[in-house]
């Protein structure tokens, strides 16, 4: 099978800020919160790659970063808000990423609302080799 889509290097940047005072089930340290939220967002890697692949079909040289602010609801851990803070990618990709993150739930939820800022880096890579026949 031959594909004409570019490979994607999609990386989740460092969590830039977190403000959480406590947890309903266990108190997370900032490091634990960073680890848990990063792992949660990693579950969407496939969807985010699909978002980027869609943009690459229109312009194979599209690249850039996207910084998103996320709010986790207290007690439930559900993402209740996503807000683009800085974008160097097309609006279509921004919207697709925001929609992909909507509805995620961090378990267990915390007693306080959590805030995080995440940066995604989108870069096209070399075209993957054709699979053997």
Image (tube, rainbow, N blue to C red):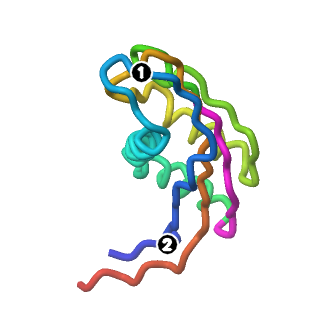
- Counting other residues with Cα less than 10 Å from the Cα at mark 1, is it few (<14), some (14-19), or many (20 or more)? many
Q: Which residue is mark 2?
A: 4
Residue annotated with mark 1: 110
Q: Residue furthest left?
A: 133
For numbered disc 1, what is the local secondary structure? loop
Disc marking residue 44? none
Residue at 50 percent across and 78 percent down: it is 127
Q: Secondary structure at mark 2?
A: loop
**Of residues 25 and 121, the one drawn nearer to the viewer in this rendering:** 25
The answer to whether 44 appears left or right of 102 in the picture is left
Q: From the viewer's perspective, is the residue at label 1 or at label 2 nearer?
A: 1
Q: Is residue 60 left or right of residue 87?
A: left
Say few, some or many: other residues with alpha carbon within 10 Å of mark 2 (under 14 / 14 to 19 / 20 or more).
few
Residue 15 falls within the magenta-colored stretch: no
Q: Residue 5: x percent and y percent?
A: 50, 68
Q: Earlier in the sequence, mark 1 or mark 2?
A: 2
Hey, which quadrant is residue 121 in on the image?
bottom right
Quadrant, the N terminus: bottom left
| Bounds of the magenta segment | 60-70
The one nearer the camera, 71 or 64, is: 71
Image location (x, y in percent) of residue 14: 57, 53
- Majority secondary structure of magenta residues: strand
Judged left or right of residue 29, residue 60 is right
Please tell me which residue lies in front, 104 or 99: 104
Instruction: Tell me the quarter of the image containing the C terminus.
Output: bottom left
Image position of 18 with respect to 52: above or below: above
Residue at 44 percent across and 39 percent down: it is 37
Q: Is residue 68 magenta?
A: yes
């Amino acid at each position: 099978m031959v594909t004409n889509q570019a490979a994607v290097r999609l990386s989740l940047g460092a969590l830039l800020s977190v403000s959480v005072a406590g947890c309903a089930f266990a108190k997370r340290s900032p490091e634990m919160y960073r680890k848990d939220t990063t792992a949660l967002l990693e579950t969407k890697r496939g969807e985010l790659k699909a978002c980027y692949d869609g943009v690459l079909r229109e312009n194979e040289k599209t690249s850039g970063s996207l910084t998103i602010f996320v709010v986790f609801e207290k007690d439930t851990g559900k993402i209740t808000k996503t807000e683009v803070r800085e974008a160097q990618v097309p609006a279509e990709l921004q919207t697709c990423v925001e929609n992909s993150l909507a509805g995620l739930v961090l378990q267990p939820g915390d007693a306080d609302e959590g805030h995080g800022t995440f940066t995604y880096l989108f870069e096209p890579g070399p075209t993957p080799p054709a699979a053997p026949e």
